[in-house]
Structures are given as structure tokens and as C-alpha cells.
Amino acid sequence: MRLVDALARRPVVLDGGLAHQLEADGHDLSDALWSARLLADEPAAIEAAHRAYYEAGAEVAITASYQATYEGFARQGIDARRTSHLLRLSVELARRAASGLDREVWVAASAGPYGAMLADGSEYRGRYGLTVDELERFHRPRLETLAAAGPDVLALETVPDTDEARALLRAVRGLGVPAWLSYSVAGEHTRAGQPLAEAFALAADADEVIAVGVNCCDPRDADTAVATAARITGKPVVVYPNSGETWDAAARTWRGPARFAAGRVAGWRAAGARLVGGCCRVGPEVIAEVARELAPPGPAA
């Protein structure tokens, strides 16, 4: 079944933070490539992390390609041919991790924002000083490679501003793979300060986009964002906040209390959410709770 058809029938459970699970398994992700480094160095670790989320109840695995770009790998001495292989491998690993499961699952090929490649925290600010055309030229080659690997959907995620959203929406045209568009937000605005209604409206008429929403934000900010995305676009909403802790880019650590609670899921679902999971610092145990919240009711006794 296509993912878009599944969404028409019921909510679908996303995975949680891939990097979180990799770190929990003892892997050091402190370099500029973050989890993408393990595509080259230890792909089996990525497969194991995907498997942990599938076993927790996730139905969609988001690939380890968030920070995998031609430019970023080139800075580490990895050429374009090898980068293309690693991007394709990210999709293959998510597929391989599902081997033997007795239920249908899907793979979302992650495409993070330009700022993720910079590895300096600018993915949470946007406004890089690049034009929409320049951003489109940056994103298109990676998206072409990921699309050719055959994922079920392209995850255009953690988008901080409307310029980058416009670029990504252009870049996915004609690739033959559906996409979701997911912003990183603060309150009722994108991270760059644009109203969410304006940001979501960009995707309302994009045929390639099957869901619109938010990720890597405080769970409290997701409450309003889900309702706004559903109202503005009429599309299924994707929502996968982080734990509620705040990333300190200078210190490269998380600060503050965790606020993600599966009890919020019912409200998101009622407001229009159809793809629900977690992002940074949300592990398999929380995804298992989300899966239970979204499970269809059992037969009456």
C-alpha cells in the first residue's frame, strides 16, 4: 500500500531521533557529519537503530541522510560518486532493517536544511544569505539521488524559513516520489520568524506534498501548529517534535527538561495529525507509547 493511501485510512507512527538511538548504542556523533558519518564508517549501526524503532512500533523509518550532502561529504574528503552511494545506502539500510517484520512499513528519505550541512546551528535560524534559486541548486542533486533509491516519501524536514521551503518545493518537482514538508518552529512562527499560516500555505497546492507539519520543535509548539497546518492546507499533518529540551550549539549539548508526553498525541490526532512520531532525544520507549496511543481500539469484550 502506498503511504498516502494508508494516511487516508488511519494515523501512521513515525520513528524517533535516529541520532539519539545511535548515541544510546554508544556511538560518538560529535563531528560535522553527525549521524551521516556512520553511513561510511559503520552502516550496521544505522540499520540496528532503525530496527529498534520498528520493534517499538514505528511504521516509518526516516533515513540517516539528514546531514548527508555532496558539499558536506566533500569537506571530509568523500567524492561525489561515493556520496551518491552513501545516500542510496541510507534508504537501503532502512529497508533492510524491516526484514522479517510481519507488517507493512515505509521509508522516508531525509533531506535536512542547508544549515544542517554547515553544522553551526544555523538550521535553527535560516536566512543564510542565499537566494531561493541558490538553495534549490543545493538541494536538487541530493533529492534526485535519494528519489532514485526508491523511498516511499521524501522528508523535507526541519525547514527554518519560507525561502528554503520554496526552494525545496521546486526541487522535488518531477522526481516521481511524494514528499512531506516539515518546519522547525518557535511559537506560531518559523524559526526565521514568518507566520506559520504563511509558511504552510506554500505547500497547499503542491501536488508532490502529501503532508505538511512540524518537527524538531518543543512539543508545546506543536499543539497550535498541527491545527494551523490542517486548516491552511487541507492535507494530512506530520508532527514529530523533539523532547522539549533545547540544543546549545556552542556547547553541543541539550539543556532543560524533557516535555514530550504521549498524552499529547490524542490532541494532535484530533487536530489533523496523521504522521506522528518524535525527533531529537525521543527514543524507542516513547515511540512505543505513541504507537499504543494511535493503535485502533480492540474488539469490545
Image (cartoon, helix red, strand yellow):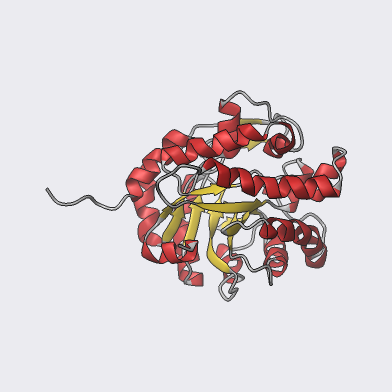
Residue 101 picture location, percent across and down = 44, 43
Left or right: 115 in relation to 211: right
Is residue 25 visible from the viewing direction of this image? yes
Residue 91 picture location, percent across and down = 63, 49
Q: Quadrant of the N terminus?
A: bottom left
Residue 52 drawn above or below residue 161: above
Name the residue: 50% across, 32% down. 257
Report the residue that reaches farthest toward the top. 26
**76, 278: nearer the viewer:** 76
Report the residue that reaches farthest toward the left. 301
Name the residue: 81% across, 43% down. 73
Q: Residue 31 occupies which quadrant of the picture?
A: top right
Left or right: 297 in relation to 191: left
Name the residue: 86% across, 41% down. 75
Q: Residue 259 occupies which quadrant of the picture?
A: top left
Is residue 260 visible from the viewing direction of this image? no
Residue 270 picture location, percent across and down = 35, 59
Name the residue: 63% across, 33% down. 44
Residue 226 picture location, percent across and down = 46, 59
Report the residue that reaches farthest toward the front. 100
**292, 134: nearer the viewer:** 292
